[in-house]
């Protein structure tokens, strides 16, 4: 701003300011200190100082009051920027949201497994029974290996593998009673087998063995029970479709819209939005499967079945995540590229199998 804006000429500004300095409400101008450092700015010091009413209060209050008076020396005025304008820096490219795994490998392996399962399921049931036994034995090997590596827990694999295969076959041939009998003999075999080694950690090892026997082969036996029915192939297919659709819905919706963590201390990647996606996808798929695939099935039964599958599959996934966190590992194995190990695929299937079997029996019977 120019000097005229202060309301006085340069030659009389000091005298008028001095005259008014003694009046109430005005401050007297303080002369600039003398010295060589200030001689260069002498011309600037002869300008009249602005007359600002002293409203009292502390220094900060007076400075805030001064800010409302115009002039380049005050905070509300900006000097023109005479620096050369620099070209705007290019914005950093936004990171694309990653799915977190090799989708091509995961899809390829999934398609391959699906083809094997469907071929064995509808061509010859005993072949599919062999697929279940193979998956159970490999899953037991992965689980016992990780327990030994990470926790020094030596659950005996041999009686678990033999007993697990016996549970599957007995369940298919003799029903639930045969599966329970095979489970009892498997537990006894684990107790006896571990006696051939030193007694140190005996209780820990056999407890882990009994847990493995229930967690993997016994739960898988319910798939064999479904298979034994007259329309067993379609019941198993419905079970597989609903579980896969639930996992896919949770993954797709959670990856795209997930913001609220479901269980951050167990599985940070799972969200509440993903759970909603799992429920919606599974209920729609359940209604379609019960109506078109299951004899005497009703669409509303499929809604309930889909809801139950979404909940059990999510709990099964969280359960295995809890085990892996306790062991300090990301995957149970590396046999399936893009998926991890066999147990990383069975985590949601195993606890879902008894749920589907029970609801199928309740809705359409066991024949």
Image (tube, helix red, strand yellow):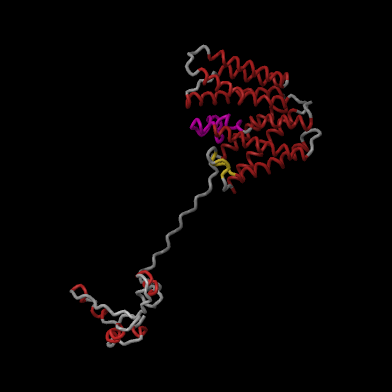
Q: Is residue 291 left or right of residue 152?
A: right
Left or right: residue 262 versus residue 55 is right
- Between 188 and 18, the one nearer to me in the picture: 18
Give the magenta part as a residue range: 323-347
- Residue at x-position 77% and y-position 27%: 366
Using the rendered view, name the quadrant where residue 87 is placed.
Answer: bottom left
Q: Hey, which residue is sitting farthest left in the picture?
A: 36
Q: Position of residue 320 (x, y in %)?
A: 57, 32
In the image, 53: left or right of 124?
Answer: left
The residue lying furthest to the top in this view is 196
Residue 267 percent across, percent down from the top left: 55, 38
Image height of 293 relative to 129, above or below: below
Q: Quadrant of the N terminus?
A: bottom left
- Locate the C terminus by quadrant: top right
| Magenta-drawn stretch contains 327 | yes
Asked whether 361 falls inside the magenta stretch, the response is no
Q: Nearer the viewer, residue 192 or 246?
A: 192
Residue nearer the viewer, 79 or 294: 79
Please count the marks in the image.
0
Residue name at image x 39 percent, y 65 percent: 86
């Amino acid at each position: 701003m120019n000097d005229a804006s202060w309301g006085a000429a340069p030659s009389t500004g000091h005298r008028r300011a001095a005259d008014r300095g003694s009046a109430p409400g005005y401050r007297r101008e303080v002369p600039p200190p003398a010295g060589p450092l200030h001689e260069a700015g002498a011309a600037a010091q002869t300008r009249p100082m602005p007359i600002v009413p002293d409203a009292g209060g502390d220094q900060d209050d007076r400075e805030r009051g001064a800010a409302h008076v115009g002039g380049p020396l005050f905070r509300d005025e900006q000097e023109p920027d005479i620096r050369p304008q620099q070209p705007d820096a290019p914005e950093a490219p936004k990171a694309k949201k990653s799915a977190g795994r090799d989708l091509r490998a995961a899809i390829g392996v999934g398609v391959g497994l699906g083809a094997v399962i469907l071929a064995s399921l509808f061509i010859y049931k005993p072949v599919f029974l062999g697929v279940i036994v193979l998956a159970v034995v490999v899953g037991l090997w992965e689980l016992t290996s990780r327990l030994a590596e990470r926790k020094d827990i030596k659950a005996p694999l041999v009686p678990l593998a033999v007993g697990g295969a016996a549970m599957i076959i007995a369940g298919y041939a003799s029903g639930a009673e045969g599966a329970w009998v095979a489970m009892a003999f498997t537990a006894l075999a684990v107790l006896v087998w571990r006696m051939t080694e030193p007694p140190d950690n005996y209780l820990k090892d056999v407890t882990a063995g009994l847990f493995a026997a229930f967690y993997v082969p016994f739960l898988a036996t319910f798939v064999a029970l479904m298979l034994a029915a007259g329309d067993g192939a379609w019941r198993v297919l419905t079970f597989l479709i609903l579980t896969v659709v639930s996992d896919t819905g949770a993954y797709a919706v959670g990856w795209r819209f997930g913001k609220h963590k479901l269980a951050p201390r167990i599985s940070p990647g799972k969200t509440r939005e993903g759970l909603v996606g799992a429920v919606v996808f599974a209920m729609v798929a359940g209604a379609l499967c019960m109506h078109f695939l299951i004899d005497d099935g009703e669409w509303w039964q499929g809604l309930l079945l889909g809801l139950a599958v979404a909940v059990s599959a999510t709990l099964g996934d969280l359960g295995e995540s809890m085990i892996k966190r306790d062991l300090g590992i990301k995957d149970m194995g590396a046999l399936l590229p893009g998926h991890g190990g066999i147990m990383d695929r069975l985590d949601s299937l195993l606890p879902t199998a008894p749920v589907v079997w029970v609801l199928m029996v309740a809705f359409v019977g066991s024949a």
